[in-house]
Image: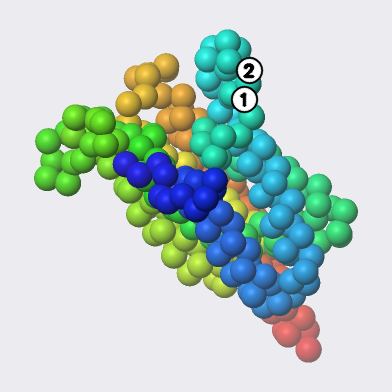
Amino acid sequence: MYPELFTIGNLTVHSYGLMIALAVLISAAAIYREAPGENLNSDHVLEAVIASTFFGLIGARLLYVMINWQYFSANPSGILFTQFAGLSFYGGLFLGAAALYLWSSWRRIGFLKLADLMAPYLALGYAFGRVGCFLNGCCYGRETDLPWAMPASMTDNLLRHPVQLYAALGAVLIFLALKYLRPRRPFVGFVLLSLFAFYGLLRFTTEFFREEEAVWLGLSTAQNFSLALVLVSAAAIYIFTGIMGRSGGNKSAKKRRKGAKK
């Protein structure tokens, strides 16, 4: 739609890159402010945000290049970043998480505790990124005659699902849900697992409205991966909630026995 927002001298501000930058800045500021409430050092948490963002962007680009290797093998110069275009969220999610784990181990901070703090803002950042996709005219949806259909770009004559906005709205709802759940979590790591489950469900759903090739069971690559992510995350939540419940039940039973002896 509007891949280039404006130009100042020789500098052109691209909509996708601007949305990614806003996502990082807003999320980093919020996480920095909320860190003391989780008994975490704000400066250390800011370091974690920088490290996970840096490696997350690398992971997002690497996975995108791998998925589109047929094109990049013939155009290797295009592998490098170009206005932050061409990123895969799953690549960023997992390499960013790996960097966060290594950094938290080095700082001797609980990885899951830190991940629970950051998880809602990862969803919020994803919403910004999808708005960037909408403005950039990429990741467009299938053709439709719905009243809110629109072209993918200024040169596109076809009306399509604004699937990027569907994803952005879903991500905002995930952000709000995770913010609600964090102070009520039954165990540390619950918010991170909930992010995986919610995002997998969102991605699985929005893929039905995108122009993606089916690879297995009539589903796209992203849908198959998202479905697996939902199932694994839901199973982990069920197992750990049960473990914590039994642990809490055992502690209560011990307290009752001690009270009876007295």
**Label 2 environment density (alpha carbons within 10 Å; few <14, some 14–19, many ≥20):** few
The residue at the point 53 percent across, 58 percent down is 22
Residue 155: image location, x then y, percent: 26, 31
224 to 93, vertically: above or below: above
The residue at the point 41 percent across, 24 percent down is 220
**Residue under circle 2?**
76
Q: Please state if 166 lies on the left or on the right of 81 as rendered.
A: left
Q: Please state if 51 lies on the left or on the right of 6 as rendered.
A: right
Q: Is residue 97 visible?
A: no
Disc 1 to disc 2, how far (Cα)? Answer: 6 Å
Residue 3: image location, x then y, percent: 40, 42
**Residue under circle 1?**
79
Residue 45: image location, x then y, percent: 74, 64
Quarter of the image where one finds residue 164:
top left
Q: Please name whichever residue, 86 or 56, is drawn nearer the observer in this view of the structure.
A: 86
The residue at the point 59 percent across, 46 percent down is 236
Q: Amino acid at mark 2?
A: Pro
* Cβ atoms under marks 1 and 2 closer than 8 Å: yes
Q: Secondary structure at mark 2?
A: helix
Q: Amino acid at mark 1?
A: Ile
